[in-house]
Amino acid sequence: MDLAARVHSVQQRLAQACERSGRDPGAVTLLAVTKGQPPEVVRAAVECGLSLFGENKVQEAKAKIPLCPGRSRWHMIGHLQTNKARDAVRCFELIESVDSLHLAQEIQGCAEKAGRTLPVLLEVNVAGESAKYGYRPEQLLAELEALNGLRRLEIHGLMTLAPWTPDAEKVRPIFRRLRELKEQCEQALGAPLPHLSMGMTGDFEVAIEEGATLVRIGTAIFGERPPPGKVPRQPAPPPSNAGGAADLESRGP
Ligand SMILES: *Cc1c(COP(=O)(O)O)cnc(C)c1O
């Protein structure tokens, strides 16, 4: 299957999941995860009608986004170190991975300097996995007021990564819990939160059935990712001692 066919197939599965759960397909946005993919692939995805993309590393995004079509829009979806907050505020339209008050304060400072307001999602580690980033639900509720007090941040909702499983039904309770947590946050804030970012290649249909408004999909659109660190890179220059010809050229007349 080529890229256009894979995009079409994902969109069709998304629409069917909406239909099963009585939701308007327009209420779910497909975000294509382009980590490990070069700008040419993003360009091809834009040609296929996609416009929203996600990256999980600031360094990679900073190099890639300027080489992508101007109409592409970008979300930060990976763990953000405070020392990368400034670049993140420059690169992204929204940060989905705010996972501490300390990070939120850093983003607030950078947004203030940049003279902008930044929409964010709060990342929640619903299953309490030790290897994952994200707020524990109790911690999130405890810090919500302080987070909401940061004037340059607009809290647009919650995000989670479900534990990996070959059987997506197993993580349905995780998605349901995130939706309930969003409702608790809405009550506490006295305002609606538009977004629930949940669901990836292996579990997005279940996430939609449980109320996802943003699904973050990489593999089902782009295929298996190249190993990390292998792309996108310039070809290496030939070694300087590669032999006769190069040596002669560099010596000059
Ligand atoms: C890589 C990644 C995805 C996409 O994963 P796939 O299984 O390839 O669809 C979604 N969300 C986050 C935060 C990711 O890092």
Image: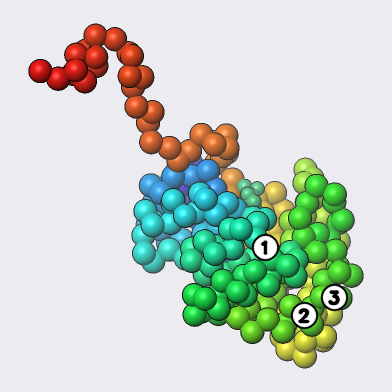
Q: Which mark is residue 141?
A: 3
Q: Is residue 102 visible?
A: yes
Between 149 and 209, the residue placed more toward the observer is 149
Residue 140: give x, y in percent of width and height.
Answer: 82, 71
In this view, the mark in front (2 or 3) = 2
For mark 1, what is the residue? 97
Residue 26 is at least partly visible in this image? no
Q: Residue at x 65, y 60 (%)?
A: 82
First of labels 3, 1 by sequence position: 1
Mark 1: C-beta under 8 Å from nearest atom of ligand 1: yes
Q: CA distance from mark 1 to mark 2?
A: 17 Å
Could you say whether the residue bearing mark 1 is in a helix, strand or loop? Answer: strand
Mark 2, residue position: 146
Q: Nearer the viewer, mark 1 or mark 2?
A: 2
First in residue order: circle 2 vs circle 3: 3
Amino acid type indicated by mark 2: Ala
Spatial CA span between label 3 and label 1: 16 Å
Vertical position of residue 230 compared to residue 5: above or below: above
Left or right: 167 in relation to 37? right
